[in-house]
Image: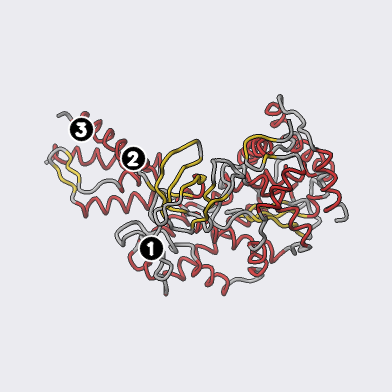
Amino acid sequence: MGMRMKIVLFLVLSLVATAVWAGQGWRSVAVRKGAVRVSPMPFGKIVATLGYGERVDVLEEQGLWFKVRDQQQGREGWMHSASLIAKPITLKPGERVEGGASEDELALGGKGFSAQVEAEYKARGKNLDYASVDWMERIQVSPEAMREFLAKGGLQNPEGGETHAK
Amino acid sequence: MRNKRAPLLAVLLSLCCGVLVSGCETTNVLDGLGAVQVGGFRISESQMGAIKKTAKAIGKAFTDITPEQEYYVGRAVGATLLGKYHPRTEPRTVQYLNLVGQSLARVSDMPETYGGYHFVLLEDEGINAFAAPGGLIFVSQGMLRCCKDEDTLAAVLAHEIAHVQLKHGLQAIKTSRLTSAFSIIATEGAKQAGGPQLAQLTGIFEESIHDVTATLVNSGYSRAFEREADAAALVILGRAGYDQRALVALLGEMKQRLNPQGLDFAKTHPDPADRIGELEPLLAEAKAPAGMALRQQRFKSVLGSI
């Protein structure tokens, strides 16, 4: 086999490996509250909320949406790809979710810029208003208030897709 | 010997090229490989491990920041901004602003972030709007005065959501800082972070937050980033059912009100007239949606007195 062939072969194998990785059948929830919706729609009814690091099996893809089944309780629904990551997330002891990733897998949880780093930064920092950030993060909009707001303003249909304003 | 080394070099070269071109994609490829046999020359698992680590260190960039880390960057940027400006906390104002914001964020290409989207109005008369990575969004009273109705306010928020979606804030962090951070994370000791490594990481974190806030408050994003955010904002407005032309109306109003020597938006953003010129071709088919009067009414009722 000539060298050129070997390089080509290697590159082909690389592509296959990428495809295998990307096409794996599961994802980890990469957000604190991962909404599982009844339909692949922005305002679709939420049937379950999954926590950071929980794993889901991918059943189907539709654009930026994945139809998933959570590995722990088998609940099914649609999640937006922005809330999922194709890597295992290992949480720190005590935070570990059942059936979580094994030690030799790439650990993402709590690494790098973490709560620990934030505490250290806060201790060093001046003129930082974390109390207001915490207040800001507590601001919630209920699904009912959202639905009413959209309907009264002639905006998106609560289930997504169609608009009232036609 | 020479012949045996050649394929190995080719492999290493192709790995390096791949890493430089596609960053995390290639490290993903490497993650899938164990020991490799190349033309009679075997790269052992441990050698492969070393290559993987090097490739990772070089390939790591803002795209490898996890949503959780992005969240902590965003919180620190938010804490810095809120250390400078007071937020308006009247429940009616807060709720309304967040309803408008959520109706847009949910239809964006990044509807969910680690900590979610949250919006506040700042007691600041300068014309400003900021988006911290991860979805904390800030609008000044001065900016609100440029908004004549809910659709224009939506245009402000959609532009900021676009910056979050496109991860522009994270891209303000110098790559060298991220490379250092990822090297620390990659070392075994970081598993039990503490001591010198925690101090080192915090130092890098501090500098990264400075990169982002200095960009948001002083230097502004590049013209290209603003153009990208404007284009994405149009898509978000359209999907939500808001008037896409409201972004042009907003820029027109800002043009009137901005003091060219000001330290606010005038300093950090391209001339609104130029941005309007770039948006016009994208708006050829934009139609005014229904319901604008209804929305203007509630906008006036909640925010009219501010």
x, y (%) of residue B286?
Answer: 72, 28
Q: Residues within 10 Å of mark 3 (few under 14, many from 20)?
A: some
Q: Both on one chain, marks 1 and 2?
A: yes
Estimate the spatial distance between the alpha carbons at disc 1 and disc 3, rounded to whole Å.
Answer: 44 Å
Q: Position of residue A82 (x, y in %)?
A: 51, 47
Subunit ID for the residue under disc 2: A
Q: Earlier in the sequence, mark 2 or mark 3?
A: 3
The residues tagged by marks 2 and 3 sit, at their Cα atoms, a distance apart of 18 Å
Question: Which image quadrant for residue A22?
Answer: top left
In the rendered image, residues at marks 1 and 3 fall on the same chain: yes
Q: Nearer the viewer, mark 1 or mark 3?
A: 1
Which callout, 1 or 3, points at the residue further toward the start of the chain?
A: 3
Disc number at residue A18? 2
| Residue farthest toward the top in the current orientation of the protein | B284
Look at mark 3 in the image and give the residue it sits on: A6
Residues behind callouts 2 and 3 on a single chain: yes
Query: What residue appears at the point 44 percent right and 64 percent down from the top-left corner?
Result: A110
Q: Secondary structure at mark 3?
A: helix
- In percent of the image, x 81 and y 52: which residue is there? B142
Residue A144's tag is none
Disc 1 marks which residue? A98
The answer to whether residue A15 is left or right of residue B75 is left
The residue shown at (72%, 42%) is B155
Vertical position of residue A41 compared to residue B209: above or below = above
Name which residue type carries label 2.
Thr
Q: Nearer the viewer, residue A155 or A45?
A: A45
Which quadrant: the C terminus of chain B?
bottom right
